[in-house]
Image (cartoon, rainbow, N blue to C red):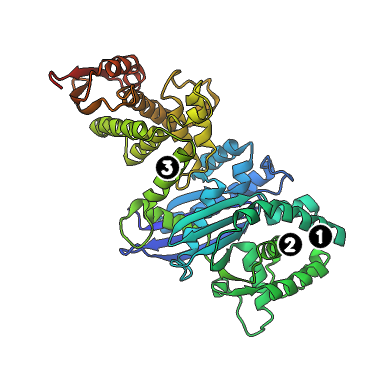
Amino acid sequence: MNEIIAAIDIGTNSFHLVIAKIDSKNRFKILTKSKEVVRLGDSSNDMKYISAESVERGIDVLKRFKLICESYHAEIIAVATSATREALNQNEFKSRVFEETGIEINVVSGFEEARLIYLGILQSLEIYDRKILMVDIGGGSTEFLVGHSGEVKYANSVKIGAVRLTKKFSLDKKADKNKLKEARIFTRNILNQVVRALENENYELVVGSSGTILSLSGIIKCENPNEELAEANLNGFIIKKKALQNASEKIYAAETVSDRSKISGLDPKRYDIITAGSIILEQIFSELNIEKMTVSSYALREGIIMNYIQQNRSGNDFMNFKNVRFNSIIHLCEMTNFDREHSFKVMENAVVIFDSISKSNDLNSDDREFLEAACLMHDIGYHISPASHHKHSYYLIRNADLMGFNDKEIEIIANTARYHRKSFPKIKHEAFAKLDPDSQNKVKKLSGILRIADALDRSHKGIIKNFGVLLENKTVNINITSCTADPSLELWGAEQRKQLFEESFGLKVKFNLKENS
């Protein structure tokens, strides 16, 4: 494993780079940081498109980040959030970035963004054993999470951020009383869903992170002229409600950007969006009855590094990465009243086939996990309707905000589940066509395995208990060795559904029933 990792946070307001070295005890040390304001979400009020100008600014910054990464020989992990997540031209932006920088962007859901931020703040504060409410105000969205001992109890992402609110109410210009009032009412309405959800959550500590909260902390801390204002020195700083109100009054009194430039401790790059950020944080304090908030200088980019460590190293010093993914999948399955025994039997069947052929067919451990996930969720579409349930399964998986997976991984899983029956994957299918060629190939192979695995439990009774797989002379022999009843229906179904597997792998499939099985 590469010991030097570069985490790039492609945000709505700013792009952040953190390069870290990971030691043998799964700890990381920050080697360098860089931050540049890009305003990716500055092009429209609704953030439906990333403008051509914003794309160019973003690419220029990422080219500079790439040069820094190369100087450290760092492996790059780039994660994009709200502005990219919501943009209808997301794929065009990602393609341009890859073509010009070689950086592949992973777009994460709001829920996954919240989980990654939680991972980051766990590294900056001694809060692992405490039940906390985490608040992260970004440019386009605000993330909320309740966590305890590394476990996510609640997570939500609401579409309100410093850039979005600024654009909606023109708060970068003169902030008159009517605009401030309208912005406060709008913010309260957006926060209402979070307030209701958190009514019965007895968290003992509130932690805040990212630019808006750090900027407001800087203003408050400047009340003491002897304090330094380095970002790291804000880690652990306490924002009290009264101090926040005082800082906010200063900001609201400064009606223009020029006036705000005179506020001590305020980052010049936030002169135009700090009014909106202040409104959001004040309303969060008010609506959730918060009296004080502890500041974390770590956030998403440090969480990206921890997430990498969880995926690539073993150890008991942090929560298990696969448990996060598995628990998220099971939660969705249970919400849709899935057939537990059948789903797990299909997964068991699929893993036997996968493990027997993966080494010779360019499939890896990640692909195995995607297949397991698709097996468990392949029939959840029944929750909507038996008719076209495979398409409903795709929709539910794609829109479920599965934790621990990035956008591309969820798309692969959802497509694999979608093609467990009926039509083969086709370019005329919009969701499949959006995948890159390598991912399309994965979907074909994984759904080919899933079709056979599902057919081998066609009756949903677990009739075929055991089977082995032997690959020889371009033929995959599936040798059934133990049954609880006549498996004729299963064998007939498997014969009918083996074609996609054969075409995808370039192999023949033969089913052999051992006598007296």
The residue indicated by pointer 1 is 180
Query: Looking at the image, can residue 498 be seen?
Result: yes
Q: Nearer the viewer, mark 3 or mark 1?
A: 3
At label 3, the amino acid type is Ile
Looking at the picture, how far across and down is residue 307, in whole percent? 42, 54
Disc 3 designates what residue?
330
Instruction: State the SS at label 1.
Output: helix
In the rendered image, which quarter is residue 14 located in? bottom right
* Sequence-earlier tag: 2 or 1: 1
Does the residue at mark 2 contact the one at mark 3 (Cβ under 8 Å)? no
The x, y position of residue 374, in whole percent, is: 40, 34
Task: Calculate the distance from the C-alpha at mark 2 to the C-alpha at mark 1.
Answer: 8 Å
Vertical position of residue 466 compared to residue 311: above or below: above
Q: Residues at badges 3 and 1 in contact (C-beta under 8 Å)?
A: no
Check whether the beta carbons of the residues at disc 2 and disc 1 lie within 8 A of each other.
yes
Circle 3 SS class: helix
Residue type, numbered disc 2: Ile
Closer to the chain start, of discs 3 and 1, is 1
Mark closest to the chain's N terminus, 2 or 3? 2
Tell which residue pokes out farthest to the bottom in this image: 226
Disc 2 packing (10 Å; few <14; some 14–19; many ≥20): many
Q: 118 or 29, which is in the foreground?
A: 118
- On the image, the x and y values in percent for residue 361 come to 29, 30
Name the residue carrying label 2: 279
Name which residue type carries label 1: Leu
Q: CA distance from mark 2 to mark 3?
A: 38 Å
**Disc marking residue 391:** none
- Crowding at mark 1 (Cα within 10 Å: few <14, some 14-19, many 20+): some
Residue found 33% across the figure and 35% down from its top: 344
